[in-house]
């Protein structure tokens, strides 16, 4: 829980220099590797949450199996929603921060920017660090 408090206590700090699109994409790739995120992106239709599953996790395995078996929507509603589960575990004093991060990340997912910004990368990092740490 201490790690989670630290993550939700962090404040956004503007970058000290400009980043190219390639650098920003590489940073997201590094975050995905560091946090062991799968390429399988889950979708939950009841709350419209979208996020990457953990690599080698049960949900990733279920997605792959669903694809092999020809399931119509192989990435939808796999088991329980990790975002909702993590929200229930988040201390009440951090719920407003978690809600803001979730909202910003879902906006990023549902309305992908034409060009990445450092802010997009930080939201990505904050969201997945909160979700899976």
Image: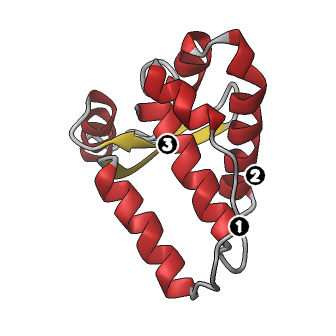
Residue 11 or 101: which is nearer the viewer? 11
Residue at image mark 1: 14
Q: Real-space Cα distance between discs 2 and 3?
A: 15 Å
Using residue 128 as the reference point, say whether residue 63 is left or right of it: left
Residue 77 place in picture, x, y as percent? 51, 28
The numbered mark, 1 or 2, whose residue comes first in the sequence reads: 1
Residue 78 or 6: which is nearer the viewer? 6
**Residue mark closest to the camera, 3 vs 1:** 1
Residue 22 place in picture, x, y as percent? 49, 86
Location of residue 65 (image quadrant): top left
* Disc 2 element: helix
Residue at image mark 2: 107
Depicted 117 relative to depicted 2: above or below: below
Residue at the image point whose x is 57% and y is 88% from the top: 20
Residue 44 or 71: which is nearer the viewer? 44
Residue at the image point whose x is 71% and y is 11% from the top: 92
Depicted 22 relative to depicted 83: above or below: below
Q: Which of the numbered marks, if any, corresponds to residue 124?
A: none
Residue at the image point whose x is 46% and y is 18% from the top: 1
Q: Quadrant of the C terminus?
A: top left
Alpha-carbon neighbours of circle 1 within 10 Å: few (<14), some, or many (≥20)?
few
Q: Real-space Cα distance between discs 3 and 1?
A: 20 Å
Using residue 101 as the reference point, say whether residue 89 is left or right of it: left
Depicted 34 relative to depicted 76: above or below: below
**Residue mark closest to the camera, 1 vs 2:** 1
* Disc 1 element: loop
Using residue 132 as the reference point, say whether residue 33 is left or right of it: left
**Residue mark closest to the camera, 2 vs 3:** 3
Location of residue 50 (image quadrant): top right
Residue at image mark 3: 128
Depicted 112 relative to depicted 39: above or below: below
């Amino acid at each position: 829980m201490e790690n989670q408090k630290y993550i939700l206590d962090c404040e956004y700090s503007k970058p000290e220099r400009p980043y190219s699109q390639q650098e920003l994409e590489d940073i997201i790739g590094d975050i995905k590797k560091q946090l062991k995120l799968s390429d399988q992106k889950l979708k939950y239709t009841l709350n419209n949450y979208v996020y990457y599953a953990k690599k080698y996790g049960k949900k990733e395995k279920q997605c792959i199996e669903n694809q092999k078996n020809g399931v119509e929507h192989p990435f939808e509603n796999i088991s329980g929603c990790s975002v909702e589960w993590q929200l229930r575990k988040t201390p009440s004093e951090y719920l407003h921060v978690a809600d803001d991060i979730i909202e910003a990340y879902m906006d990023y997912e549902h309305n992908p920017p034409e060009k990445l910004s450092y802010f997009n990368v930080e939201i990505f990092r904050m969201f997945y660090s909160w979700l899976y740490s």
